């Protein structure tokens, strides 16, 4: 079924539907009746497992040729469970420096207090990852493409290192999903995804998922989830199942739109930098072609001349694109990463990963790409007009 992802998300293994309903039902029950003490049912308590959540888990696992996923209340809840599963006091996590701000915060401000050492490296250099791995390293966590710079890490190269050193490798695959990038097939041991983003796709339900072909990892992660109460709710799982039905179509269409928009922005005279793996001028374009399956995702980032001041004026002048802290929705969204998703990161860390005050992240939706291009261009024109008016006023005043 995994050769046919659209069929998998529409059908797959489904829960028992006594009334023959086409749409999966929501099992909004906290607990499940037993017939006898010694004969537990498949589900006993919804903090541990739930039929609606299990259907989502089965489909997500099937898409990666793996056992059922383990679903959580959010992507960060999934990462938390993973670290708790693999690490103890005195252990080290080697992590991409260019990653989601919440991941960085989790390691530096939460797990560091429990003597779990988070070390951030330039994961685009496999050699840096190898140098950072010590005897007490129990997890390597990379994000590719990175948030928000889109920097790429060579999963195959890093996997060769981690396998040699017997350290589990986890890939945060939120930006591409398994439709475009299949980390397990590239050598990774685990994938983690914020299903809140592209998988659900409609900004209606939070969630996260861990997928692996290692049953011992999944068993430990499920135990942590049961013990900490971080399972996804049945209603959010149901909403995510509805979004999942169109995931392959949406991801491809949004990626194609992003390609058109990235090319247009790269030619705009007042935009000095565009980060998108589909551009032939992108630093790791060859890696993108070999690692991604035909498309390069719906997220890009760019900088206009003028830094923070221009970024502020630009996002305020947009009429179609919405300013939010989110990616992956069917609508086009903009984010000022330095003050929003990465607002808790130190200035030194932002400089290390090249997140400037003028950087704007664009999550491309399903609108016609020319509409988004026109929206950005009209916003830039407004800024230019204001600057010209200011210069004229200053000239008159002098």
Image (cartoon, rainbow, N blue to C red):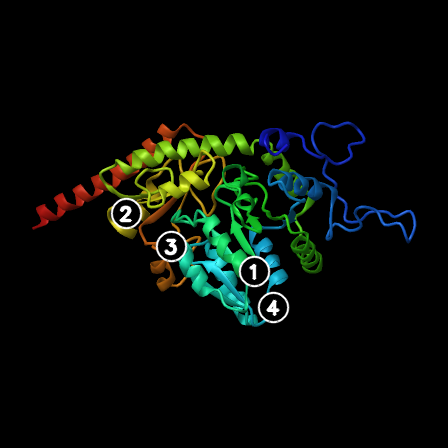
Give the mark nearer the N terminus: 4 vs 1.
Answer: 4
Q: Nearer the viewer, mark 3 or mark 2?
A: 3
Q: Which residue is identified by label 1?
A: 166
| Circle 3 residue | 338
Question: Can residue 363 be seen at all in this image of the molecule?
Answer: no
Query: Along the horizontal axis of the image, is 41 left or right of 294?
Result: right
Q: Is residue 93 visible?
A: yes
Q: Earlier in the sequence, mark 3 or mark 1?
A: 1
Q: Is residue 262 above or below residue 221?
A: above
- Spatial distance from mark 3 to mark 2, Cα to Cα? 14 Å
Q: Nearer the viewer, mark 4 or mark 2?
A: 4
Q: Tag 1, which secondary structure?
A: loop
Labels 4 and 1 touching (C-beta < 8 A): no
Mark 3 to mark 4 CA distance (whole Å): 31 Å
Dot 3 surroundings within 10 Å: few (below 14), some, or many (20 or more)?
Answer: many
Q: Quadrant of the N terminus?
A: top right
Compare marks 1 and 2 and give the one earlier in the sequence.
1
Residue 138 sits in quarter? bottom right
**Whether label 1 touches label 2, CB < 8 Å:** no
Q: Pointer 4: what residue? A: 88
Neighbours of disc 2 within 10 Å: few (<14), some (14-19), many (20+): some
Q: Earlier in the sequence, mark 3 or mark 2?
A: 2
Judged left or right of residue 203, residue 388 is left
Q: Mark 1, mark 2: which one is toward the viewer?
A: 1
In this picture, residue 297 sits left or right of residue 2: left
Residue 310's label in the rendered image is 2
């Amino acid at each position: 079924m995994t050769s046919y992802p659209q069929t998998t998300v529409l059908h797959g293994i489904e829960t028992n539907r006594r009334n023959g309903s086409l749409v999966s039902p929501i099992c909004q029950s906290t607990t499940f009746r037993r017939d006898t003490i010694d004969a537990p049912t498949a589900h006993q308590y919804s903090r541990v497992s739930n039929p609606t959540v299990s259907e989502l888990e089965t489909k997500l696992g099937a898409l990666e040729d793996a056992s059922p996923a383990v679903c959580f209340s959010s992507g960060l809840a999934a990462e938390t469970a993973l670290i708790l599963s693999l690490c103890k006091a005195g252990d080290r996590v080697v992590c991409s420096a260019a990653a989601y701000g919440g991941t960085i915060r989790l390691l530096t401000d939460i797990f560091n207090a429990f003597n779990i050492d988070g070390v951030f490296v330039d994961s685009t250099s496999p050699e840096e990852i190898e140098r950072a791995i010590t005897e007490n390293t129990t997890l390597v966590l990379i994000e590719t493409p990175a948030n928000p710079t889109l920097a790429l890490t060579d999963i195959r190269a890093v996997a060769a290192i981690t396998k040699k050193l017997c350290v589990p490798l986890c890939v945060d695959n939120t930006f591409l999903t398994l439709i475009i990038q299949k980390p397990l097939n590239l050598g990774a041991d685990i994938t983690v995804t914020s299903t809140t983003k592209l998988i659900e796709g409609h900004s209606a339900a939070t969630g996260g998922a861990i997928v692996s072909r290692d049953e011992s990892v999944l068993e430990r992660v499920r135990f942590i989830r049961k013990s900490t109460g971080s399972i996804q709710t049945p209603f959010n799982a149901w909403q995510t199942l509805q979004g999942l039905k169109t995931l392959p179509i949406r991801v491809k269409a949004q990626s194609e739109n992003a390609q058109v928009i990235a090319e247009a922005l790269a030619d705009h005279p007042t935009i000095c930098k565009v980060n998108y793996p589909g551009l032939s001028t992108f630093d790791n374009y060859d890696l993108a072609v070999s690692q991604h399956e035909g498309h390069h995702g719906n997220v890009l980032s760019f900088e206009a001349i003028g830094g923070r001041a221009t970024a502020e004026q630009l996002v305020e002048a947009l009429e179609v694109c919405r300013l939010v802290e989110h990616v992956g929705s069917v609508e086009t969204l903009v984010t000022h990463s330095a003050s929003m998703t990465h607002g808790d990161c130190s200035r030194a860390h932002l400089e290390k990963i090249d997140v400037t005050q003028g950087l704007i992240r664009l999550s491309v939706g399903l609108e016609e790409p020319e509409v988004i291009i026109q929206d950005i261009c009209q916003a830039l024109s407004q800024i230019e007009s204001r600057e010209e008016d200011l210069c004229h006023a200053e000239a008159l005043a002098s």
